[in-house]
Image (cartoon, rainbow, N blue to C red):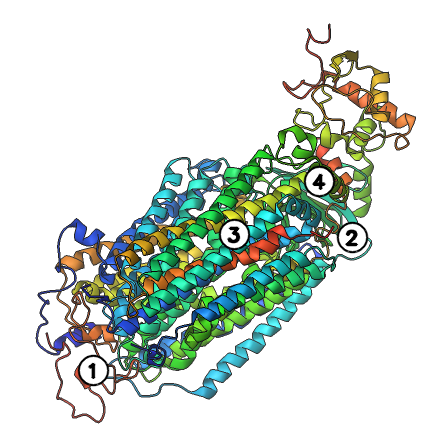
Amino acid sequence: MQSPLPFFPEQASNFAGNVDALFLFILLTCLFFAVLVTVLAIYAAFKYRRTSPGEVGSTVHGNTMLEIGWTVIPLVIALGMFSWGAVIYVNYRTAPKDTLDIYVVGKQWMWKLQQPNGKREINELHVPVNRDIKLILGSEDVIHNFYVPAFRVKMDVVPGRYNTMWFRPTKIGKYHFFCSQYCGTNHAVMGGYVTVMDPAEYAAWLSDEAGNVDPVSAGEKLFTQLACVTCHIANGTGRAPSLNGVYGAKVLLADGTTVTADDAYIRESILLPKAKIVAGYQPVMPTFQGLVSEEQILNLTAYIKSLQSQPVPAKGAGIAPANAGKK
Amino acid sequence: MHRTGALFGQFETLEQQKDTASLGMWIFLVTEVMFFGGIMLAYTINRHSYFHAFAMGSKTLSLKLGTTNTVVLLASSFTMAMGVWSAQVGKKKLLPMFLALTITLGFIFFGIKYVEYAQKFHHHLVPGRNFDITYCVNNPSRCEDMSAEEIDAERVELQEAQAADPDLNAHAQLYYSAYFGMTGLHALHMVIGAGLLFWLLRESLKGRFTPEWNTPVDLVGLYWHFVDIVWIYLYPLLYLIDRHN
Amino acid sequence: MADHEHAEHAEHIVPPTTYMIIIFTLLCLTLATAAVAYVNLGPLNIVVALAIATTKATLVVLFFMHAKYSPKRTKLVIMAGIFWLAILLFMTLSDYASRVDYRGVRYPMTQNIVLMNSQQS
Amino acid sequence: MSAESTKTTGPEPKFPEKHYLNASYGIRSWLLTTDHKRIALLYLASVTFFFFIGGFFAMMIRLHLLTPSGYLLSADTYNRMFTMHGVAMIFFFLIPSIPAVLGNFLIPLMVGAKDLAFPKINLLSWYIYIIGGCFTLYSMVSGGLDTGWTFYTPLSTVYSNSAVAPAVVGIFITGFSSILTGLNFLVTVHTMRAPGMTWFRLPLFVWAHYATSVVMILGTPVIAITLALAAMERLFGLGFFNPAMGGDPILFQHLFWFYSHPAVYIMILPAMGVISELIPTFARKKLFGYHFVAAASLAIAVIGFLVWTHHMFLTGQSTYAALAFSFLTFLVAIPSAVKVFNWTATLFGGSISFDTPMLYAFGFLGLFLIGGLTGLFLGCLGVDMHVHDTYFVVAHFHYIMVGGAVMGYLGGLHFWWPKITGRMYPEWLARIAALVLFVGFNLTFFPQFLLGYLGMPRRYHVYPPEFQVYNVMSTAGASILAVGYLLPMIYLTWAAFYGKVAGNNPWPATGLEWTTASPPPTENFEVTPVVTWEAYDFHSRPELGLDVPGTPSGVVAPAHGHD
């Protein structure tokens, strides 16, 4: 990008060279035909320009051999272009084995990315150079598209399904990535940078601040791994009550009684969910007996405790109103 | 353009006029095929993805009503064809009679369709916020039109379907999206057809249609038969999914 | 004006007896399709149902709609309609049918994606 | 130059006393007319209106993009601008432009009929267009529309806060206008041809419209049902395209592009038809390979239906489907190439003049060449991985739609303006306008190819600073282009009232439409014409007054027929 009128973005992946070469091949072929037709048309326009008002052209009106020629020759060339393009595309859609898998989630209007060890980034992606990287793409809302021009690759991020894309960065550096599928208001700012690093640096970066795990974050991780989060949605719109501010509070149950949400209640609710049903909710929670260890229950409890200070949604919390449950 | 008798000004002969009108109608019917084709495609893909939900949805429909309606509509197609024949051979008394019969059968179809739709609304089976495929099973008292045996049978079916498809309620909405989308569009076409038939009936009572000039009868007939064909496909696609289980 | 060869055909009038035979066949086929739906034919159920429906539709087109006695041009229009419908259906379905990840492994990585969502929500 | 030359022959032409424009007066005589020529003028006024609305949005877009951070509009406003630009231009200008204006006016004249087969349906289709247009205008003024003209779900059905429903309903309604126009054309060409007007004597303009009508008939109903489903999804909660209910947003794209890709051919095929008229007329020579050009039109219409998922190579469609559709995409390029070669070959051995319509034809040839060839890059799977959804695509389809379709439309308007109004436009002003348009167009859109390959995604209201140089060029070009569009509107309107009287056949050209008066009488021809000549045959037409070898030279019959 040094020149003021650049033509090619940087080539920074295994695909870049191939795509550019194919691009140049098509470009030169097309230029040949474009120049040919243009030169012929201009030549004819001057050679056969009208010289007297009543002049008419010749009676030539066709030539079957010519027609066949200019149907078949372009067809053959076009099939050449198709085949070359197909080879690159099939390679792109077929990820190699042993890739470094990175999860990418698009939402209006940010990218959330996660390294294999769980390290998360927002609108930033760090990858080691010369390693096959596979991105697994999901969307929370509308269709997005993950596009790295320097790598010459993009793929739609479609809600309701997972797409994958892969590439092998070949050059250390920092490259733009964009959302290239229109996704609403801030579509244009939904981008960031891919940082391609030396493998050693990448390893160091990866282990940085990802080491010590406290019970709260371990519990948070479990809370999502066990899919608790799909029903216990923080804003109270889920099938189960929000857990914000629940710890230590009184909970109104379906039978009209209240109970204090302490460690024991939380443990019981995890292992025997049907024992106490919060008012206004269906008994849909499955039991986690045998699925979680005691340590994990502690971690989960620590996490739920940490939600004590979170804002309680107006609707959808299990907390009893001040005057409830007295009867 | 001036009109000379039955001949419109842009044409040279009656033959040309009839030929043109009939070609126009057929081309219009082709656009209708493509129109229904789009929703058929949506149906096919979703039925393939969520077969259990679609089978469950299909079983909540009344086969009795659906089959009756098929018979009614086929019969109306027959009376319409007879109407066209009457016009062609110049039976000026028979034509209005067959047209009136066709309209009557059309309205019987609407009546039955109304019963079916009303039941679906009543049973909370209309896509949207209140959709609940388990409504009747959970609230048998609210579905007084279903017998206890029917409710029990549905409960068993529902349990099986839910076991196969945990997100049954969402996917069953897709079935009802298809059901209301397809039958609704079909009914809309029938309404237009009925309107055209009323107009034909009025004109035929005036004795306007002769063996020489009966193009409108012919064209409306084509349209009516096409609407019949759409139903011929909707019937197995909507009513007859997985009935044998 | 043009295409005179069609216009000069005398109109073919189908006799009522033909219509009666057709309607009788159609009603029989309707009952047949309802009956056969209760027989477990596995994947063939839908094939049989559609085959019967297509037979019925063909009878309606050929006789009630007089396509059998219509000029070639009308038949061409009908065939074009069917052909384009087939393009729409089959070429779209070819994509779905050949997707390796289509619905079968629809959410293979749910836990991981859910893991991603947790921090923001 | 022939503009001067053709006018030296024969006596001064006279304006006919009775013609379709003065056959009756008053607003009712226009709003209730069933005359295809008057309906064409109704369409002309309405598509011009939408063209300038769309053009205004385009100007706002280009001005906004002058700087990387965009200084003019907010993100939401910008998104509304490009969406409404697309909707106005595609559904309300490009699709009806040539068919509904020039096609409507000319097809009955060209086949020698008194009117289209269904004149009332023709008027109805204009009203449907206007009603659809009103819905869409309502959407534009009541909150706008910010989904992109492609209406991708679930953005359009669930997430957008703008006035999606009225716009979708408007486009749905307008679709029926397109269907009825196509139906009318098909039937007219089949059953209304004059004696002697065999299929292979039809002008290629008619062939092109026949192919276009096939696309309209078979494609438009699919977009209608798709948009109807999307609207019902937004309004009543149907779920076919909603992933939250298990629906599939990719299905929407399949259905949408099943129409919207062939719709590109609705826009470009009629323009190709216009060019196939212009080149033989101004080269005074039979079109090279008539049968092949006619067949190419049909081939484009048919194969054009088999390529739609090349808009979806990177949505995660199956690799196999992508391969098949890419292959078919390369196939559809061939008939377009055949046409270009035949047009070029026609020039050889011709007697070429440089009247304004011919300048547009040359312009079309150059721009369509670039537009068509860049389609190969996009149809090629390996390159599409990089350039899909970037400015490369934007540049490509503007070269086809503006460089191709609009150039063809303007060329056709100039060519037939004498027939429509009976008067000539100012020749030199028109040539300058054609040149301004050509230069402005290339300056606007060529830099966008470079932007696209550099990786600038489309529909961005702000962009990284490294893309600025090309954006500035593009905006500069757009300013020139705007002037280029205003010019013809002004002088064509002027010429309709004050231009030089044209006479029946000022060029002269060979089509049947040039044998009747300019402007034509309401019933088109005083007596039903009988066609005895092949299309574009200057040699067997002594009444044109040309120096045909073999006829005694110097005996020049008046070019202006029998008025």
Residue C66 drawn at (x, y percent): 44, 70
Instruction: Look at the image and tell me whether residue D198 can be seen.
Output: yes
For badge 3, the amino acid type reads Pro
Which residue appears at 63% of the width and 61% of the height?
C32
Is residue A205 positioned above or below B186 on the image?
Answer: above
Q: Which residue is mark 3?
A: A4
| Quadrant including the N terminus of chain D | bottom left
The chain identifier of the residue carrying mark 2 reads A
Report which residue position mark 1 lands on: A52
- Alpha-carbon span between mark 4 and mark 3: 72 Å
Spatial distance from mark 1 to mark 2, Cα to Cα? 72 Å
Q: Residue at x 35, y 61 (%)?
A: B94
State which chain disc 3 sits on.
Answer: A
Residue that mark 4 sits on = B154
Label 3 vs label 2: CA separation?
32 Å
Is residue C97 shown left or right of residue D424? Answer: right
Q: In this rendering, do the residues under marks 3 and 1 share a single chain?
A: yes
Residue at mark 2: A131
Q: The disc labelled 4 sits on which kind of residue?
A: Glu
Total numbered badges shown on the rendered structure? 4
